[in-house]
Image (cartoon, coloured by chain):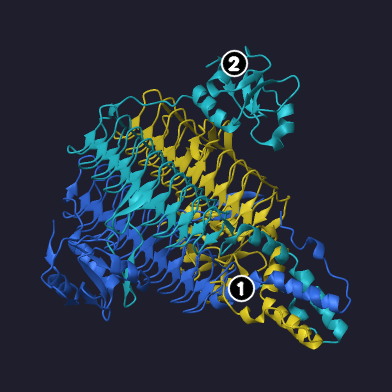
Chain colours: A yellow, B blue, C cyan
Amino acid sequence: VITHRLGELAARVGGAVRGDAERPVQGIATLSAAGPDQLSFLTNAKYREAAARSRAGALLVPRGVTMAGRDLLLVDEPYLALAALLELYHPLESPPPGIHPTAVVDPTATIDATATVGPLAVVGAQSRIGPRAVLHPHAVVGARCRVGGGSILHPHSALYDGTVVGERCVVHAGVILGGDGFGYATHAGRHVKVPQVGRLVLEDDVEVGANSALDRALLEETRVGAGTKIDNLVMVAHNVKLGKSCLLVAQSGIAGSTQLGEGVVLAGQAGVAGHVRVGAGARVAAKSAVFKNVGEGEQVAGIPAIEAGHWRRQQALLGRLHEMQRRVRALEERLGVAPGGDKTEDKAPE
Amino acid sequence: VITHRLGELAARVGGAVRGDAERPVQGIATLSAAGPDQLSFLTNAKYREAAARSRAGALLVPRGVTMAGRDLLLVDEPYLALAALLELYHPLESPPPGIHPTAVVDPTATIDATATVGPLAVVGAQSRIGPRAVLHPHAVVGARCRVGGGSILHPHSALYDGTVVGERCVVHAGVILGGDGFGYATHAGRHVKVPQVGRLVLEDDVEVGANSALDRALLEETRVGAGTKIDNLVMVAHNVKLGKSCLLVAQSGIAGSTQLGEGVVLAGQAGVAGHVRVGAGARVAAKSAVFKNVGEGEQVAGIPAIEAGHWRRQQALLGRLHEMQRRVRALEERLGVAPGGDKTEDKAPE
Amino acid sequence: VITHRLGELAARVGGAVRGDAERPVQGIATLSAAGPDQLSFLTNAKYREAAARSRAGALLVPRGVTMAGRDLLLVDEPYLALAALLELYHPLESPPPGIHPTAVVDPTATIDATATVGPLAVVGAQSRIGPRAVLHPHAVVGARCRVGGGSILHPHSALYDGTVVGERCVVHAGVILGGDGFGYATHAGRHVKVPQVGRLVLEDDVEVGANSALDRALLEETRVGAGTKIDNLVMVAHNVKLGKSCLLVAQSGIAGSTQLGEGVVLAGQAGVAGHVRVGAGARVAAKSAVFKNVGEGEQVAGIPAIEAGHWRRQQALLGRLHEMQRRVRALEERLGVAPGGDKTEDKAPE
């Protein structure tokens, strides 16, 4: 068991203690699960009451919060502090460096002496694996790939030939990097494959969630900007350029040749059509579909996606269509006009 | 070839024969493919005519159905009986127990003597594999995992460290269990990873379809209730709690910390936002997006999802918007009011 | 470096040169990346200006295009010609035939002498691998499968028992073929698995993108027609029949027992419900959901999908709902009728 005094924790995250700085803390837990030996946290004001009821020994809270009789650790950004404290209590286990005897490494590959190549992993010809990189069991790296220092490839991930993974990237299990783009020339009803001869580049500090698939370019590069984080089951098509620090939430998808600026957020199950530009800082709502360019900082929603406020007003009006129909009917009656089509008004589309 | 008399089949499923109970049945086939040696089935009244035309030697039908000149096997629930009879004709092949010489099993792992660990499978430190469990080729079990008795892990499935799989679960090929949740603290435009230190628990009798991804919790547990069935390419985010006997159809997704009650159904490509509660027995229509709590037994549809009947009426009105516009125009003309904006009425959004 | 004269390239693709037929071409690149030694291409009129600015030594263009002072390669179908020329400059590397010593091949399997079974690949009992087929590292072929001549299975692909892959198919990394369909008989709230005892058949020249999942049939066959191309993360459920030369774009999905005619296109993230027929040549727009039969050659869009032109008009009217409400209000005022419900008109749905 790892134990730290509350005061030590505060020092580590640049926070302040209100209460007993000597209180020992043996771990971190949610408000409902935490016991007297643990620290819990309040990162969302709506859980204030749950915090008051919590049995947690101490609470990580935003500066300014007061809670009578509780030992508090006050910080500017509780969620950021939480990240640091979780790392403290759950240090990442690094597997020992070296190449497992069951791994299959091409003799022309270069594996840094501090890297780990796990059981049954494969590294192809002329590929280079950087310092402290970890290939978990069953990771497959094709030929002429580069995996940067400190990057982690989880089980069943695969890099097609020529894929580049930057430094400190995390490639989760089942992720496929650099597969062929979906490109065919259709001739007389037959789809002729257009060879996809470009590559995929992940810049540094990119994370890709389980079972996502990012394609190589037709020519040149598909590129994911530094610090971009991609959730599970996301699709990134050929020739796409993602800016730095984007967030692509689960099951979102981006069609070919589209460009996202820095810090763009695609919420869950959103989609962006091909050959479109989405400006820096733009946000696409969950389940929406972007079919045309989106400006910097814009927030869009809907299918097709429009300005988010506009979409919300449209939805509100949609909910009141029945009433509008009633009002039109009333006006018609008032004027003695024959009503238009009322007979089917409540009929569902199927 | 496995042969049973129709009467034996009836006895096995608690049904009754109308016709020749001695008729030999050598297998089960669809109405269009079945021949005189085979049993077919009528589980949906709309295939009644196809049943009449079928060359099947016998038909499994709901009690009460009559078909002149056909040998019938009458049961209360034909689909349930079909399940039992298919098992009879297609008994599951169990691979022989034992650890394949190419598997990589950590010396601290515990493998039950009746379990199978297939070619090139991996089992990490301190993991326990229960009786009659089957790890197919290339299944990867991390450290400190538990795989319950009778559970099956198909090729290329992966369990991250600490994942728990109950008894009699089926984990299909490419499924990733217990990957990191998508959690970042954004500070000055940079996304700092919040370590995901909880785990994922599948209770008993859960089935997960090919290439689905279920994440571990930030802290404590993501949990899938007993008997819940998950289709292919489904996403379950961190901290989610799924009740017992839910059905999550293909490509549906659930965002973080959401809770589903018992028996909830998400149809194909549906989504549920984070921090939402969906009551027991609720049903979410295909392609819908739930953004707020759904009550017990409610049926919802649309983006955002609303009560399904309401959604259908809205769709019907939407189909008649053009007519409503025409009526407003007619009223305006009647009153000599200048028409409002008719010039663009047929213009498409792009 | 591979070098060809522009005239040779023209001869190979049945085109004509305008300009210097002796110009050496060392490769193909996009308009912005190409240098004087390279050929670029103009397949979309909207890039005309970019073509004029390009530093490319020569341009592949549709017949009829003129560009002063540029060496042009004129063809009827530039995209088709591009496919042929890319193959010329990037010949597919075929790994040497033979079975890698780390592969696990059942003694009853039949591997053609010209086929390649890569490192750590698995081939089950009684399966047959055809001439020049390539199993990349970590491909898993179950028992009683057939992989046709010239087909390629990429890393971490898996074929469940009995799956048939035709000739010249490409199965990308992480693809799962022939997994169980999602079929349960629900009895007293419990979901009882209906054994899925059919199989999956890919006809010739099918390509399946990374991490897609295609299920076996309940009985008989799920079938993918010859020349059909499937993108990444696509779901095809049990009993589905896909015609020849369909295109299923990324993250689209098809529910059980649905049939698509020849040449159907599902755009990205589209869905088709179960037991539906989609006629030959029909096109389903991105993010749409088909719930009922679609006729031959129809173009549909929306959720539920309707005729695409109708959907576009509906969207246009939707964008003008606010105006219609204003007009109804004006009529009410004119007639001295109490307004209906204006107070909430700008309220968003949540």
**Mark 1, residues whose alpha carbon is within 10 Å: few (<14), some, or many (≥20)?**
some
On the question of residue A320 being in view, the answer is no
Residue located beneath label 1 in the image: B316
Q: Is residue C305 rendered to the left or right of residue A91?
A: right
The three-letter code of the residue at mark 2 reads Gly
> Which of the chains bears the disc numbered 2?
C
Q: Is residue B234 rendered to the left or right of residue A292?
A: left
Q: Position of residue A283 (x, y in %)?
A: 66, 55
Q: Which quarter of the picture shows residue C181?
A: bottom left
Q: Nearer the viewer, residue C65 or B158?
A: C65
Tell if the residue under mark 2 belongs to the same chain as the one under mark 1: no
Secondary structure of the residue carrying numbered label 2: helix
Q: Is residue A176 rendered to the left or right of residue C18?
A: left
> Which of the chains bears the disc numbered 1?
B
Q: Nearer the viewer, residue B323 or A36?
A: B323
Q: Nearer the viewer, residue B98 or C157?
A: C157
Question: Residue at (78%, 75%) from the top-left corner?
Answer: B328
The three-letter code of the residue at mark 1 reads Ala
Q: Position of residue B345 (x, y in %)?
A: 76, 63
Question: Residue at (37%, 65%) from the top-left corner?
Answer: B229
Residue located beneath label 2 in the image: C7
In this view, B166 is above or below C113? below
